[in-house]
Image (cartoon, grey):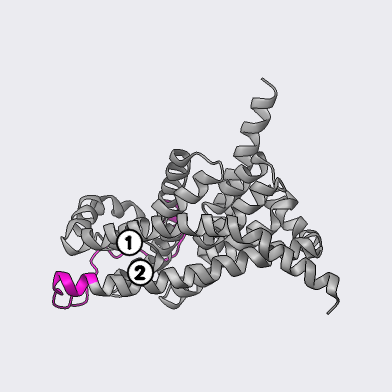
């Protein structure tokens, strides 16, 4: 390896470390705080109470009331929490596909809204858009998917409730594992992002995905961030997104368009595979959210156009 190449590698790593460290600490603080709060809500049976309150609404999605707890868990925590609840329910492929599509639209709401807001999007708008999109897709899928809704679903037996200190210890181990994983992924991803741009790989990637970006209504310079959001999600990809913004490589307008798309359609690798393994139909979850994202992005473009021509 030439000395010049080594120097470029070292310089990229040095440049990216300070901003990545700052963002990493911010993400971990939010993640741990939300995780701890949800542990308390679950332990003191507050989360089930919330799900029981909204369960009657789930009839319009063709889902039994018991599915509400899975949705609420995913909404406030993450997809893994929703899967844990779904594993206690006996849902068919139709119900699972509807429920999982809704969860994919609006999971990890607290953390991901914080990420989207930090990139310049309106936090309130993101919450409303993601929640309404989940509900709209739930209604539409219930209308168009073959078969009929089965609202009487049996639940598996629930194990004995653990003591508070045992629950707290299990939460600590789980949170520690998550934090270590997040640190590794965030640093690796941000360094990779800087290297790809330094050595001209980003331009080549942009050319390959440019036709797809046009369909989505997204600028070609958001390709890398779109790939990041689709592969590993918003939480892990936050540092790369913020780094792009700080460098000025992506404009505020372009980021808002990207946020409008990825707030609905992201984590289309690991999360999609996990929910498919649970029994949901992957292509319905993917294409339905893509369709919603396309509508939202072009609506956002219309807003920009009208604002510019006032």
For the C terminus, the image quarter is top right
For the N terminus, the image quarter is bottom right
Q: Residues within 10 Å of mark 2 (few under 14, many from 20)?
A: some
Position of 66 relative to 57 (above/below): below
Position of 240 relative to 5 (above/below): above
Residue extending furthest toward the top = 310
- Which residue is more in the foreground, 172 or 42? 172
Is residue 154 at all visible to an observer of this figure?
no
x, y percent for residue 212: 72, 57
Which residue lies under the disc numbered 1?
A: 35
Q: Looking at the image, do the residues carrying marks 2 and 1 touch, with CB atoms under 8 Å apart? A: yes
- Which residue is more in the foreground, 74 or 112? 112
Q: Residue at x 61, y 54 (%)?
A: 241
**Distance from Cα at disc 2 to Cα at disc 1:** 7 Å
68 is within the stretch colored magenta: no
x, y percent for residue 215: 70, 52
x, y percent for residue 11: 73, 63
Q: SS for tag 2? A: helix
144 to the left or right of 225: left
Q: Earlier in the sequence, mark 2 or mark 1?
A: 1
Q: Which region of the structure is painted magenta?
A: 139-168
Res 190 quadrant in image: bottom right
120 to the left or right of 177: right
Which residue lies under the disc numbered 2?
A: 175
Q: Residues within 10 Å of mark 1 (few under 14, many from 20)?
A: some
Res 97 quadrant in image: bottom left
Q: Residue at x 58, y 50 (%)?
A: 261
167 is within the stretch colored magenta: yes
- Which residue is more in the foreground, 234 or 12? 12
């Amino acid at each position: 390896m030439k000395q010049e190449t080594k120097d470029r590698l070292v310089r990229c790593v040095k440049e990216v470390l300070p901003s990545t460290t700052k963002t990493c600490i911010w993400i971990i603080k939010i993640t741990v705080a939300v995780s701890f709060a949800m542990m308390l809500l679950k332990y003191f049976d507050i989360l089930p109470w919330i799900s029981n309150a909204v369960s009657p609404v789930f009839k319009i999605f063709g889902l039994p009331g018991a599915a509400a707890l899975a949705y609420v868990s995913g909404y406030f925590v993450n997809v893994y929490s929703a899967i844990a609840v779904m594993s206690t329910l006996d849902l068919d492929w139709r119900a699972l596909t509807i429920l999982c599509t809704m969860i994919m639209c609006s999971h990890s709401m607290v953390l991901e809204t914080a990420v989207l807001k930090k990139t310049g999007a309106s936090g309130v708008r993101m919450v409303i858009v993601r929640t309404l999109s989940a509900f709209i897709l739930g209604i539409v899928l219930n209308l168009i998917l073959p078969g009929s809704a089965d609202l009487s679903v049996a639940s598996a037996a629930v194990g004995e409730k653990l003591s508070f200190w045992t629950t707290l210890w299990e939460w600590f181990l789980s949170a520690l594992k998550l934090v270590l994983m997040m640190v590794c992924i965030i640093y690796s991803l941000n360094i990779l992002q800087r290297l790809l741009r330094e050595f001209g790989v980003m331009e080549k990637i942009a050319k390959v995905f440019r036709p797809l970006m046009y369909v989505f209504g997204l600028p070609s310079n958001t390709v890398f961030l779109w790939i990041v959001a689709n592969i590993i999600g918003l939480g892990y990809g936050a540092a790369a997104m913020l780094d792009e913004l700080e460098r000025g490589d992506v404009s505020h307008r372009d980021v808002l368009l990207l946020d409008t798309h990825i707030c609905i359609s992201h984590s289309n690798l690991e999360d999609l595979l996990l929910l498919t393994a649970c029994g949901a139909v992957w292509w319905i979850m993917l294409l339905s959210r893509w369709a919603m994202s396309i509508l939202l992005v072009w609506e956002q473009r219309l807003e920009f156009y009208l604002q510019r021509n006032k």
